[in-house]
C-alpha cells in the first residue's frame, strides 16, 4: 500500500492581466481588471489499495454534498469485434441488480442518500457515479461498491436494458448531431475500435446476459479502476469509508483489458452525406487531425481552437453567426481519447446557406492556418481557457469529471496545475505553428446531415465528391 | 490571503454549529440591499475559488410579450448583447472572455436573466458593463437583422429540425391554456419574428428594463461591503422608470380533458406529453405540488419509471415535474403545469401507455406515498435543490429569481425546510384533487408515415 499526497501548485502570480490591443475600441470609462488571484488547486490524496484499486480523495469544505465516481478501463473501444457498442448495454444494465440488491433497491437506496446512480460508457472506460448528501455518503458508498463488485445482470433486467438501449439508439438516429458524429468517426477511424460511437441494433439484439457478465468480469477489476471522492469530508474520514466499502472488492482473475492500439487516422477531403429527409437545416461538420492530451502541442492547439471557434469571440462565431447570421450554434472542439485526438468544427445552418456557410468555414480554417492570432486573440483565448478550467473546478462533480478524464488518458491529478501552466506559457509562435499543422481545410473530412438534394446542390460546386453514407 | 482563509474557516464552523441546531439547514452567508432607484442587490460570499458569478434578472419574460409579437422577449434578450452607444457589439464578450469567463442570457415565462461567470479580476468591468446596458442600448437595425437570423436558426436547431420539437414545452401549454399570455408559442412564429422592428426593441426596453424591475446578484470570492459600494457607484445613478404593471393572467377553470394528436416527421419513436394545471402559486401548496411531481418523476426510483418502464414496460423514458422543463417549482409567476414527457415503444398505442399512467397516478391519489418513500423523495429533493446553489453563477441566478418572483432571496435556503413540512396525506389529497382527467391536456405525438422519397432516403 502506497499513500502519497500531492499538492498542486498554481503559479500564475507573475501573469499580467491587462487589456490587450483591441479590435473593439473599449469604452473610456471601463474600469480596469483587478489583480489576478492565483487559482487555488485542489489537494488530491492518492491511495493504492492492496486489491489494486486507485483512490483519489479531494476534501473540500462548504457545499454539503459528496460526489463519488468510479471509472474502469474498457469502454466502447474494448468491445468484442462482433459486439460493437456493447459497453453501452453493459453501462445501462450494470446498475440493475446485484446478488444482494434488486434494481429497485439500488435506485431507492441511492435516492434515499439524495442521489441518482448513473452509468455511462465512453471510448476508453465506463463511469459509474453519484452525488449524494454528505451526511448520507456512508449509506451510498456500499451500494456503489456492491454494483462494482457484484453486478449480476438478471435476465429480465438485461431484457429491459436491451430494449431501452435499442430505443435510445433509434432516437439518436433521428438526431443530426449523432448522425454526424457517427459518420465522422467511421470515416476517420476506419476499422479501428474508435470508429464505434454506439451499439448497432444487431449488436444489442445479440447481446446475452452471459456475455454481459463476462464483459463485466473483464472490465470491473480494482487494478484497472479509479475511485474518486470529492466532498466536505476529512480525507481520513473519506478514506475510512472507502476502505470499508471497497477493500473487499476481489482482485480479478481474468485477463485485463488490453491497451487500445494507436489508430492510423485518415482524413479524406470529400463530403460524407447522411440523408435526413425533412431537415430544415444542414448539419455541417469538418474533422481534421489533432493532438492527444499527452502530446506536447496540446495546449497550443487548444488555444488555436479557442481562437478559431472555441469561444464566443472566435473567428468562426464572429463570422457566420454575429456577422452573417447563418447559424445559432457554430463551434469547434478538440476531442481527445486515450490514444487519439482530432478537431471537429460544426454548425447547423438553414438549407439555403449550406454552401455559403461551408465556404466561410473553410475560409476561416485556412485563415487560421495562415494568419497568426493577434495579440488580442491570444490574450482572450488564453485567459478564457484558464478561466474555464477554474470555473469547471467550482463544483465537486466538475472536479471529479476532470480528474476522471485525466486518469483515463493516463495522467496524474497534478495535470490540472501543469495543464494551466502550459496554457499560460503557450507562445504565439507555438499557437501559430499548431494552427499551421492542423487547421487546413483541404485536409478535413466533411460531413453533412440533411436533405440529400440540398446538400448535393449546395456542396458539389466546391468540386468535392459527395458520398452517401449512413 | 491568510486572513481570508482563516475567516473562511471561521464562517464554516459557524455554519456547522447552525446546522446542528436547525436540522439539515445549509445557508451560505448572503446579504441584500435595495438602492434608491429600486435595484435590488444580493451578495453571497463564497471563497472556495477565485471566481465570481453575476446574474441580473429582469421582471419580464415571454408571458407578457405583446400579441402579434410571439418570441419577442427572447429576441430582445439577444439584443442585450448587441452593444450600447459607448460599448459596441462584441465588447462585452471580449471583456468577459479576456477576464477568464463567459456571458450568457436566458428567457423564461416570467423573467429574463443575464449571467456572467469569470475570474474575480473581471468583477469591476463586468459590473460596469451590466450597468451600461441598464442605461440604454445601441438600437441598431443592422444588429436586429443579424439577431433575427440567429434566433430563427436557434428555433430551427431546437424546434423545427429536432425530433419532438419541444412539443411538451411549447405545444402543450398551447393546448392547455386559453389566453394568449399562457398559450402562445414563446419561441416565436417566423412571421412575428420577421415583423419585429427596432422601435419595438426600444419600447420593450423602456417598459421593462429599468433598475426597479431588476435584481442583481453577485456570488463568489468577494467582500460584501466592497460589492455594495461598487454597485452603488456603477448602478446608483441609473434613473428609476415607470414599469408596466402585470396584467391578470388567470385562466378560466378547465372542465374537460383535452386530447390531441400530432405527427412528427423527424421522430422515430412515439411520445406523449401530459400536462395538469397547477393551483395558483402559494407557499405551501406549491411545495406539495412539487413533491407530488417528484414522487412521480424523480429518477429511476420514481413511481412512473418503476411502473411504466420497469413493471409494465410501456415506456422507455419518463421525465417531468412541476414547471418542467423551464425551471424549478418556484421559478414562475402565473399559471403553470405539471408536465410528463414519455417516450414509448413503436409497437404500442398512446392509449396503452395512458392506461398504465392513469393506474400509477390513481394509486398515488388513492393511498398516497409510503412513509419511507416520502422520506426518500424529501432527501432527494433537498439534495437536488442544493445543486443549483453550489457554483457562484447558478446561486446568483437562484437568489435573484427568488427575490424577483417570491420577494425573498433567502427563500432558496429555506426550501428544504418546506419539504420537511409536507405530509403523505397532503400529497394524496393533492393528487386526488389536481391529477384528474378534467384538469389535464394530452398530446400524443407519433412518427409521420414515411413519404416515398423519405423512405428511400431513410433506407440508406
Image: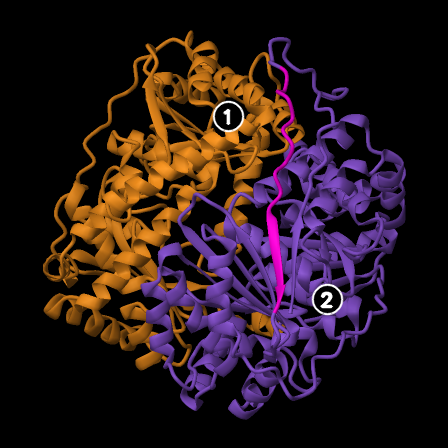
Q: Quadrant of the N terminus of chain A?
A: bottom right
Q: Nearer the viewer, residue B115 or A183?
A: B115
Rendered position, B334 above or below A160: above
Q: Quick one: which chain is orange?
A: B
In this picture, which residue range is highlighted in magenta? A32-48
Above or below, A381 against A229 in this view is above
Dot label at residue A185: 2
Task: Give the labeled residue for mark 1.
Answer: B80
Residue B100 occupies quadrant:
top right
Q: Are marks 2 and 1 in contact (CB under 8 Å)?
A: no
Dot 1 alpha-carbon crowd within 10 angstroms: few under 14, some 14 to 19, many 20 or more: many
- Which x, y percent locates residue B367? 11, 70
Give the chain of mark 1. Answer: B
Q: Which chain is purple?
A: A
Q: Could you tell me if residue A321 is visible in this image?
A: yes
Give the CA distance from mark 2 to mark 1: 39 Å
Q: Residue at x 27, y 46 (%)?
A: B20
Amino acid at each position: 500500500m502506497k499513500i502519497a499526497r500531492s499538492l498542486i501548485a498554481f503559479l500564475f502570480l507573475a501573469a499580467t492581466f491587462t487589456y490587450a490591443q483591441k479590435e473593439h475600441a473599449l469604452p473610456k470609462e471601463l474600469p480596469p481588471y483587478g489583480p489576478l488571484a492565483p487559482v487555488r488547486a485542489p489537494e488530491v490524496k492518492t491511495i493504492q489499495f492492496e486489491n489494486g484499486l486507485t483512490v483519489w480523495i479531494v476534501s473540500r469544505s462548504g457545499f454539503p454534498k459528496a460526489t463519488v465516481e468510479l471509472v474502469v478501463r474498457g469502454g466502447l473501444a474494448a468491445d468484442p469485434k462482433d459486439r460493437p457498442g456493447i459497453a453501452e448495454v453493459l453501462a445501462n444494465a450494470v446498475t440493475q441488480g446485484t446478488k444482494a440488491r434488486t434494481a429497485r433497491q439500488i435506485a431507492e437506496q441511492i435516492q434515499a442518500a439524495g442521489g441518482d446512480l448513473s452509468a455511462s460508457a465512453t471510448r476508453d472506460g465506463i463511469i459509474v457515479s453519484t452525488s449524494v448528501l454528505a451526511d448520507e455518503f456512508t449509506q451510498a458508498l456500499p451500494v456503489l461498491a456492491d454494483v462494482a463488485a457484484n453486478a449480476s445482470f438478471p435476465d429480465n433486467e438485461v431484457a429491459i436494458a436491451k430494449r431501452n438501449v435499442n430505443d435510445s439508439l433509434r432516437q439518436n438516429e433521428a438526431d443530426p448531431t449523432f448522425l454526424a458524429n457517427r459518420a465522422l468517426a467511421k470515416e476517420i477511424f476506419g476499422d479501428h475500435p474508435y470508429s464505434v460511437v454506439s451499439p448497432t441494433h444487431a449488436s444489442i439484439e445479440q447481446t446475452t446476459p452471459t456475455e454481459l457478465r463476462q464483459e463485466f468480469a473483464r472490465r470491473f477489476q480494482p487494478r484497472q479502476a479509479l475511485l474518486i471522492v470529492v466532498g466536505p469530508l476529512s480525507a481520513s474520514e473519506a478514506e475510512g469509508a472507502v476502505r470499508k466499502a471497497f477493500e473487499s472488492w476481489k482482485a480479478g482473475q481474468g485477463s485485463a483489458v488490453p491497451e487500445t492500439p494507436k489508430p492510423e487516422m485518415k482524413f479524406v477531403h470529400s463530403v460524407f452525406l447522411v440523408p435526413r429527409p425533412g431537415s430544415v437545416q444542414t448539419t455541417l461538420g469538418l474533422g481534421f487531425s489533432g493532438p492527444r492530451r499527452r502530446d506536447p502541442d496540446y495546449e497550443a492547439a487548444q488555444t488555436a481552437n479557442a481562437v478559431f471557434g472555441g469561444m464566443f469571440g472566435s473567428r468562426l462565431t464572429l463570422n457566420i453567426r454575429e456577422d452573417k447570421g447563418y447559424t445559432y450554434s457554430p463551434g469547434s472542439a478538440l476531442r481527445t481519447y486515450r490514444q487519439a485526438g482530432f478537431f471537429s468544427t460544426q454548425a447547423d445552418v438553414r438549407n439555403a446557406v449550406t454552401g455559403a456557410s461551408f465556404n466561410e468555414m473553410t475560409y476561416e480554417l485556412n485563415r487560421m492556418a495562415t494568419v497568426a492570432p493577434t495579440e488580442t486573440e491570444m490574450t482572450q483565448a488564453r485567459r478564457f481557457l484558464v478561466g474555464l478550467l477554474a470555473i469547471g473546478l467550482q463544483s465537486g462533480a466538475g472536479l471529479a469529471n476532470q480528474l476522471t478524464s485525466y486518469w483515463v488518458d493516463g495522467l496524474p491529478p497534478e495535470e490540472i496545475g501543469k495543464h494551466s501552466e502550459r496554457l499560460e506559457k503557450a507562445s504565439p509562435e507555438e499557437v501559430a505553428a499548431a494552427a499551421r499543422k492542423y487547421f487546413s481545410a483541404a485536409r478535413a473530412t466533411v460531413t453533412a446531415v440533411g436533405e440529400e438534394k440540398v446538400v448535393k446542390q449546395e456542396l458539389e460546386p466546391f468540386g468535392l465528391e459527395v458520398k452517401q453514407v449512413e | 490571503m491568510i486572513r481570508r482563509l482563516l475567516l473562511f474557516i471561521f464562517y464554516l464552523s459557524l455554519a456547522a454549529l447552525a446546522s446542528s441546531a436547525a436540522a439539515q439547514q445549509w445557508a451560505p452567508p448572503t446579504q441584500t440591499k435595495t438602492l434608491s432607484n429600486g435595484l435590488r442587490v444580493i451578495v453571497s460570499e463564497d471563497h472556495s475559488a477565485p471566481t465570481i458569478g453575476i446574474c441580473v434578472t429582469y421582471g419580464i419574460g415571454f408571458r407578457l410579450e405583446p400579441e402579434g409579437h410571439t418570441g419577442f422577449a427572447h429576441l430582445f434578450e439577444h439584443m442585450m448583447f448587441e452593444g450600447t452607444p459607448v460599448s459596441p457589439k462584441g465588447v462585452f464578450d471580449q471583456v468577459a472572455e479576456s477576464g477568464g469567463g463567459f456571458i450568457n442570457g436566458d428567457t423564461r415565462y416570467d423573467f429574463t436573466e443575464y449571467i456572467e461567470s469569470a475570474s474575480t479580476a473581471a468583477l469591476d468591468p463586468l459590473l460596469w458593463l451590466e450597468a451600461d446596458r441598464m442605461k440604454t442600448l445601441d438600437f441598431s437595425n443592422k444588429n436586429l437583422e443579424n439577431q433575427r437570423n440567429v434566433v430563427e436558426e436557434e428555433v430551427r436547431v431546437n424546434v423545427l429540425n429536432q425530433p419532438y420539437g419541444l412539443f411538451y414545452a411549447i405545444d402543450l401549454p398551447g393546448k392547455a391554456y386559453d389566453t394568449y399570455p399562457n398559450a402562445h408559442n414563446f419561441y416565436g412564429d417566423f412571421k412575428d419574428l420577421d415583423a419585429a422592428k427596432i422601435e419595438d426593441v426600444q419600447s420593450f426596453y423602456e417598459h421593462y428594463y429599468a433598475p426597479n424591475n431588476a435584481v442583481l446578484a453577485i456570488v463568489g470570492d468577494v467582500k460584501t461591503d466592497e460589492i455594495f459600494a461598487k454597485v452603488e457607484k456603477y448602478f446608483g445613478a441609473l434613473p428609476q422608470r415607470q414599469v408596466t404593471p402585470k396584467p391578470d393572467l388567470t385562466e378560466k377553470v378547465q372542465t374537460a380533458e383535452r386530447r390531441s394528436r400530432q405527427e412528427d416527421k423527424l421522430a422515430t419513436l412515439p411520445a406523449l406529453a401530459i400536462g395538469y394545471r397547477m393551483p395558483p402559486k402559494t407557499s405551501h401548496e406549491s411545495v406539495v405540488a412539487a413533491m407530488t411531481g417528484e414522487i412521480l418523476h424523480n429518477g429511476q426510483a420514481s413511481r412512473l419509471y418503476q411502473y411504466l418502464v420497469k413493471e409494465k414496460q410501456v415506456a422507455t423514458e419518463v421525465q417531468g415535474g412541476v414547471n418542467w422543463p423551464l425551471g424549478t417549482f418556484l421559478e414562475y409567476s402565473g399559471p403553470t403545469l405539471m408536465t410528463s414527457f414519455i417516450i414509448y415503444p413503436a409497437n404500442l398505442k398512446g392509449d396503452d401507455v395512458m392506461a398504465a399512467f392513469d393506474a400509477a397516478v390513481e394509486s398515488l391519489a388513492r393511498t398516497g406515498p409510503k412513509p419511507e418513500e416520502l422520506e426518500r423523495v424529501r432527501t432527494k429533493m433537498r439534495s437536488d435543490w442544493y445543486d443549483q446553489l453550489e457554483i457562484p453563477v447558478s446561486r446568483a441566478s437562484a437568489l435573484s429569481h427568488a427575490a424577483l418572483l417570491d420577494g425573498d432571496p433567502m427563500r432558496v435556503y429555506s426550501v428544504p425546510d418546506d419539504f420537511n413540512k409536507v405530509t403523505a396525506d397532503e400529497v394524496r389529497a393533492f393528487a386526488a384533487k389536481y391529477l384528474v382527467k378534467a384538469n389535464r391536456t394530452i398530446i400524443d405525438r407519433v412518427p409521420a408515415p414515411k413519404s416515398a422519397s423519405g423512405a428511400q432516403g431513410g433506407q440508406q
